[in-house]
Image (tube, rainbow, N blue to C red):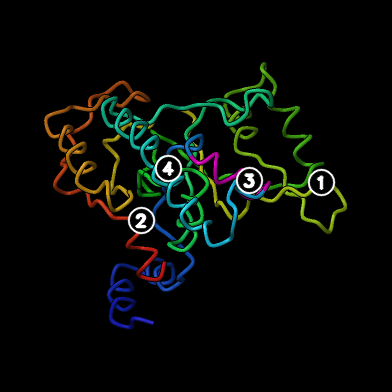
Amino acid sequence: MSLIHILQAFSKGGLTGCQIQQRDWSPFVVHFTSWSAMQPFRELFKSPPLVNASDQLPQFVDSALTQADKLSFITFHSIIQSGFIKANSPSEKDGIPPCVCFSECNLPGLIGHCERYGRFGFVFSKSDVFANPPCGRPCLYVDSATYTVIDKDGSQSASRERKRLFGLSNVYSPVETGLKIQDFTHEREWRVFSNVPLSFLRAVLCPLQYHAKVLSSIKELRNTNLTNTMSGRLEQSIAPDSIPVIPIDMLFEWGA
């Protein structure tokens, strides 16, 4: 444990010190893109890949990852050009309102998370996301009986607050309950029920080979005033030189 850094954190307050020394805690949330680009890897766990021998599997994964990163970068660049992350419903059939989903995973958790949702990540401070706006909140993980009550209260005629409560709720059903297993607590999910402007951006995660392209994309925001779509006010221009671009590959090699 790094004693000097912990003591420095305690100089900012007791709560800050306690949080910083808790190594599975994070002051940040991240939105990865793109879920659809990672489809080949989800299929990989459902059925064996079309390879003739196990020694071909690394090459299969490398090729699929190259293609997935290519598709994810297209989505990443379009978000940069728009100046905000667009809210979409995680499940329209279940009536979940449009939102932007984040994870507050620690560093090792981020590696696994990006393998499901794409390797380009937009990093924000939890305190910025929590503020009003954007008024983001951590998700709830409740049993099925409680979820049923929340679901009824989250109907179309319900108040905005009740709809948000429904939108933040997830069924938690571990194997011991005897019901269908459903447990997404490892994602430590947050949701914002509106578009999220990049004026809040703190850092970007990306594959190492796209580092230069991502830096170039961020510089496109240098002279862009970003309109906060939640408040309608004009945000301060983003300062591209102050936004770190961190290769996800390096974090993994470093021990994350």
Looking at the image, residue 120 sits to the left or right of residue 44; the answer is left
| Mark 1 closeness class: few <14, some 14–19, many ≥20 residues within 10 Å | few
Circle 1: element type: loop
Q: Position of residue 32 (x, y in %)?
A: 43, 43
Residue 61: x and y in percent read 48, 52
Residue 176: give x, y in percent of width and height: 84, 59
**Nearer to us: label 2 or label 1:** 2
Q: Which mark is residue 247?
A: none
Mark 1 or mark 2, which is nearer the start of the sequence? 1
Q: Residue 46 magenta-drawn? A: yes
Query: What are the residue bounds of the magenta stretch?
Result: 38-47
The amino acid pointed to by label 1 is: Lys
Residue with the mark numbered 2: 248
Disc 2 residue type (three-letter): Ile
Three-letter amino acid code of the residue under disc 4: His
Q: Tag 2, which secondary structure? A: helix
Name the residue located 29 percent from the left edge and 67 percent from the top edge.
Answer: 12
Q: Measure how far apart labels 2 and 3 are at the Cα level.
A: 28 Å
Instruction: Specify which label sits upstream in the sequence, 4 or 3.
Output: 4
User: Label 1, on which residue?
Assistant: 180
Q: Main secondary structure of the magenta part?
A: helix
Q: Is residue 34 above or below residue 46?
A: above
Marks 4 and 2, how far apart at CA? 14 Å
Asked if the residue at tag 4 contacts the one at tag 1, i.e. Cβ–Cβ closer than 8 Å, the answer is no
**Badge 2: how crowded within 10 Å, few (<14), some, or many (20+)?**
many
The residue wearing badge 3 is 140
Q: Earlier in the sequence, mark 2 or mark 3?
A: 3
Q: Nearer the viewer, residue 161 or 249?
A: 249
* Residue position marked by numbered label 4 in the rendering: 31
The secondary structure type at the circle numbered 4 is strand
Residue reaching furthest top? 157
Position of 48 with respect to 220 (left or right) is right
